[in-house]
Amino acid sequence: MTEMPPNIPRAIHRGSDDLPFVALGDGTHIQVLQIDVDAGLWVVRTKFEPGVTIPRHKHTGPVFAVTFAGAWKYIEYPEVNVAGSYLYEPAGSIHTLTVPADQDEMTDVWFAIYGANLNLDDDDNITTVIDAGGVLEVYRALCAEAGHSDPNVIVGKGVDG
């Protein structure tokens, strides 16, 4: 094995079981992989139970998504995301994520999100703001509540948290 020079940044690895999934209580389960509050980045893996619909929301930054299992779509669009699908959402997009109720499996999606999710009511008023710092705080609290040790989420620009 070749030693890397000390001035070369090292890659940071997390195995699929290194960070727990925790339930949010609405049929979604999250695993927070990386948070960079300064960049407004949150990288999460989310598992959705069949029949879940999350609130209509607007993104202040771009979102990148890869689906590993199951299916989901936005109520506002005809396309269905299935295993192997990639989705790009530009900043400013507004949509309502829904998972078909007739699935036999959880839907499993990786998201890299910049900026905030602004949950909206029927009159487009902001009801909730979800951002990188808030996601990390909630994840750590839910992990503690579930009896997991403080999760070793990658925090900052490649610095372990």
Image (cartoon, rainbow, N blue to C red):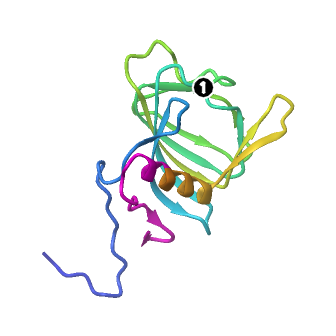
Q: Position of residue 83 (x, y in %)?
A: 40, 30
Farthest right residue in view: 123
- Of 134 and 79, nearer the camera is 134
Q: Position of residue 156 (x, y in %)?
A: 51, 70
When the figure is inspected, residue 125 is found, relative to residue 80, above or below; the finding is below
When the figure is inspected, residue 68 is found, relative to residue 4, above or below; the finding is above
Rendered residue at 60%/60% (across/down): 133
Rendered residue at 46%/12% (across/down): 102
Side of 97 where 10 appears, left or right: left
Q: Amino acid at mark 1?
A: Thr
Q: Is 143 colored magenta in this rendering?
A: yes
Q: Secondary structure at mark 1?
A: loop
- Of 89 and 100, nearer the camera is 100
Rendered residue at 29%/53% (across/down): 15
Query: Dot 1 corresponds to which residue?
Result: 53
- SS majority, magenta: loop
Rendered residue at 12%/75% (across/down): 1
Quarter where residue 109 is shown: top left
Farthest left residue in view: 1
Q: Is 84 colored magenta in this rendering?
A: no
Farthest top residue in view: 102
The region drawn magenta spans: 142-161
